[in-house]
Image (tube, grey):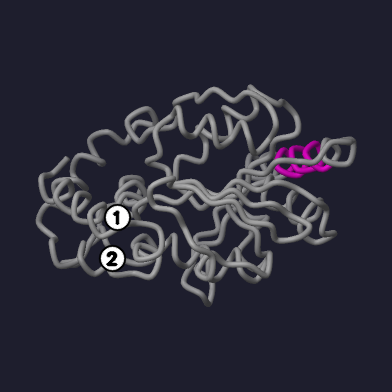
Amino acid sequence: MRDAAKQVTFFIRYAMLRARLAALREEPVVVASTHRTASTAVYRSLRVAIGSRVFKCHRLHEPLMSWKRPDPSVSADGMLRNRMTGDWAVLHGITQPRRPARLVMMVRDPVAVAASMAAFEPVQNGAAWPLVQPFSNAMTDWFDADVLPALGWSPWNEPFDTERKAMLVDQSPWRILVLRADLDDGSKERELSRFVGATVRMVRVNSAEQRGAGSSHAKVLARLSQLPDEIDRVHRSKLCAHFFSPAELAAQRARWLSGN
């Protein structure tokens, strides 16, 4: 009975999002990012600034979405399926009908993404943990197996300014702002404010410690300090080569090996 009630609640929340989208006369803004990329802080900040125009999703490609919970299944592309009302609302209300919208996508050091995701999972055996699938390649897989089939676009052929830590792309009928998660708050505010045409002030939320994973996160950090070869492997990904400079990756490597 409890599971049935939760499923009904899920459909009600989905219906409310769809109704909000249908009633919206302005261009919607979607924070579309994979897990653990500081997307919640950006979403909350935009909601404070421009209200009901803002939506959030983690998946854009329908085969990676689920109506069921729990659904720990992994797709043929090696990605965890996601159950989120925003995924389905954006799919049915924006991407499938090709409704004009503005999309904000966050990029984070994939080692940090893996560390944050692993903090919420049981400790696994294996010499490479926590830099294992689906954690270690989550961001690259998201662009290749989720964003590309859904939007017909991926970032690899677009130049990324590693000093600005941001890029703006026109992929009609959508405009896409890609932001590095480590961009300072003042610069994030300026990029987001220009993008949505309103003043945005950053709100900090949703850290691993705030969500009760502080001790697990500390264990993950301690483990990473023992994995220089695995960090190098992840940092050799095309995502890191595209979005980060060699000096930035070297600094991040030193940070992980220090245990912080």
Magenta stretch contains residue 99:
no
- Magenta part of the protein: which range? 8-18
Dividing the picture into quarters, in which one does residue 38 lie?
Answer: top left
* Residue 234 badge: 2
Q: For mark 1, does the 10 Å Cα neighbourhood hold few (<14), some (14 to 19), or many (20 or more) residues?
A: many
Residue at the image point whose x is 37% and y is 27% from the top: 210
Q: Is residue 53 left or right of residue 199?
A: right
- Where is residue 206? Give x, y as percent: 44, 32
User: Residue 254 in the image: x percent, y percent?
Assistant: 14, 50
Q: Is residue 43 above or below residue 147?
A: above
Residue drawn at (83%, 35%) of the image: 20
Task: Quarter of the image for the N terminus: give it.
Answer: top right
Mark 1: which amino acid? Val
Secondary structure of residue under mark 2: helix
* CB under 8 Å between discs 1 and 2: yes
| Residue 191 sits in quarter | top right
